[in-house]
């Protein structure tokens, strides 16, 4: 008899273990969402975006607090937040306190584009067009001149639609990844001929890069060698122009 009692107790315990999660999930789904928490993922730059901005953006489009847990579509929340021009990726989940939690990965401005008509936007590292925020400027190089048509804010550069912007994206990524050239140039000017001029933050000279066809990194390595080996210390104002258009040469024009 004792053996039968033990077996019955073990069966009841096993049923409880099996049924309790399903019961808890059913009860959890009936509860309302208590709050919405948005945070920037570790390592993300908040220079253009705050969590308050994102929370307001989400709640303007979908009032989630008070909604039943079972009615909250996490993928829909993620897609909705990713319509914000500064959001690259969103990941949402519900915690045990019935709170909606969202981690945000932001778009990172790479260059500031300004065409002849005065339109100004940021180009992100992923090739997305970002609107400016006057109260929150970002220190990146300004690109102006003959840029061609700039897509609307929030859109991603269509592949091959604007070769000039494709070139600038590749060049901007090169500058970003180079500790020496990063933040060195304050301006990039695009000529109608397809050539580029770089304006450094130091000195009064300009750098004629020429066209970016071929490997522009070779020209930049020649420039690095000139800055680090051929330019005497304190002589940034000695030249008015450094020309990289000739193969494996840096042709200098001195101040008069």
Image (spheres, helix red, strand yellow):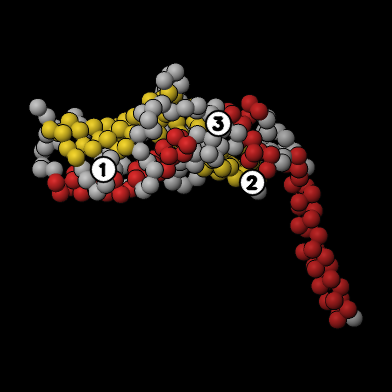
Mark 1 or 2: the one toward you = 1
For marks 1 and 2 on the same chain, the one whose residue lies earlier in the sequence: 2
Q: Secondary structure at mark 2?
A: strand
Residue lying at 28% horizontally and 40% vertically, measured from the top left? 245
Circle 1 packing at 10 Å, graded few (<14), some (14-19), many (20+), is few
**In this orientation, does residue 86 appear?**
no
Report the Cα–Cα distance between label 3 and label 1: 39 Å
Give the residue at mark 2: 93
Q: Secondary structure at mark 3?
A: loop
Q: Position of residue 108 (x, y in %)?
A: 45, 39
Residue 101 vs residue 165, the one in the foreground: 165
Q: Position of residue 209 (x, y in %)?
A: 30, 38
Mark 3 or 1: the one toward you = 1
Q: Is residue 120 above or below residue 203?
A: above
Q: Quadrant of the N terminus?
A: bottom right
Q: Position of residue 118 (x, y in %)?
A: 43, 19
Lateral position of residue 58 relative to residue 209, left or right: right
Residue 129 vs residue 36, the one in the foreground: 129
Lateral position of residue 32 relative to residue 101, left or right: right
Residue 122 vs residue 164, the one in the foreground: 164
Give the residue at mark 3: 154
Label 3–label 1 contact, CB within 8 A:
no
Write down the quadrant of residue 63 in the picture: top right
**In this orientation, does residue 83 appear?**
yes
Give the residue at mark 1: 246
Report the Cα–Cα distance between label 3 and label 2: 25 Å
Report the Cα–Cα distance between label 1 and label 2: 56 Å
For marks 3 and 2 on the same chain, the one whose residue lies earlier in the sequence: 2
How many numbered marks appear?
Answer: 3
Residue 137 vs residue 162, the one in the foreground: 162
Q: Secondary structure at mark 1?
A: loop
């Amino acid at each position: 008899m004792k053996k039968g009692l033990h077996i019955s107790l073990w069966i009841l315990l096993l049923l409880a273990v099996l049924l309790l999660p399903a019961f808890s999930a059913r009860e959890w789904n009936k509860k309302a969402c208590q709050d919405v928490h948005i945070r920037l993922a570790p390592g993300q730059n908040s220079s253009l975006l705050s969590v308050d901005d994102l929370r307001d953006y989400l709640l303007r489009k979908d009032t989630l607090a008070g909604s039943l847990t079972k009615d909250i579509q996490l993928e829909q929340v993620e897609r909705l937040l990713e319509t914000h021009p500064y959001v690259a990726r969103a990941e949402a989940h519900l915690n045990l306190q019935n709170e909606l939690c969202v981690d945000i990965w932001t778009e990172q401005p790479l260059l500031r584009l300004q065409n002849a008509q005065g339109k100004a936007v940021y180009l992100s590292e992923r090739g997305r067009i970002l609107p400016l925020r006057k109260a929150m400027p970002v220190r990146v190089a300004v690109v102006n001149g003959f840029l061609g048509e700039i897509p609307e804010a929030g859109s991603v550069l269509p592949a091959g639609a604007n070769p000039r912007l494709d070139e600038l994206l590749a060049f901007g990524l090169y500058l970003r990844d180079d500790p020496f050239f990063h933040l060195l140039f304050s301006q990039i000017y695009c000529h109608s001929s397809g050539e580029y001029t770089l304006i450094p933050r130091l000195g009064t000279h300009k750098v004629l890069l020429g066209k970016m066809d071929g490997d522009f990194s070779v020209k930049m390595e020649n420039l690095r060698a000139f800055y680090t080996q051929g330019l005497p210390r304190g002589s940034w104002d000695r030249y008015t122009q450094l020309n990289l258009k000739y193969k494996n040469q840096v042709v200098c024009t001195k101040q008069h």
